[in-house]
Image (cartoon, grey):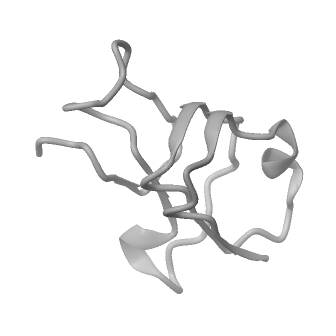
Amino acid sequence: TYLRLSYNAFTGAAPEGLGELTQMKLLQLQSNRLTELPNIPELDESLYNTSTFVTDCGVPSAFDEPLECDNCTMCCNANE
């Protein structure tokens, strides 16, 4: 399963069902206004390296409380 959902102006919490997609190979959620992420299993980075699971977590953030993720491979807002 490959989900490229970036740049769609999604708002609110991402659906919990995303974490249940056991064949997920790629998940890109950056450049939306998501406030919560479901628990996404660690994805295999062998196909897409650091762009396997991309989100808008980290700082600086457009939110008062920055979005946190446990298993993302790239945080678009990270100052690192």
Residue 38 lies, with reference to residue 10, above or below; the image says: above
Q: Residue at x 62, y 47 (%)?
A: 10
25 with respect to 76 (left or right): right
From the image, which quarter does the C terminus lie in? Answer: top left
Quadrant of res 12: top right
Residue 23 lies, with reference to residue 20, above or below; the image says: below
Residue 71 lies, with reference to residue 35, above or below; the image says: below
Outermost residue toward the left?
80
71 with respect to 59 (left or right): right
20 with respect to 29 (left or right): right
Q: Residue at x 51, y 35 (%)?
A: 70
Place of residue 39 in the rendered image (x, y in percent of width and height, measured from the top left): 70, 36
Place of residue 26 in the rendered image (x, y in percent of width and height, measured from the top left): 62, 72
Place of residue 9 in the rendered image (x, y in percent of width and height, measured from the top left): 55, 51
Place of residue 69 in the rendered image (x, y in percent of width and height, measured from the top left): 50, 35
Q: Residue at x 19, y 32 (%)?
A: 60
Outermost residue toward the bottom?
47
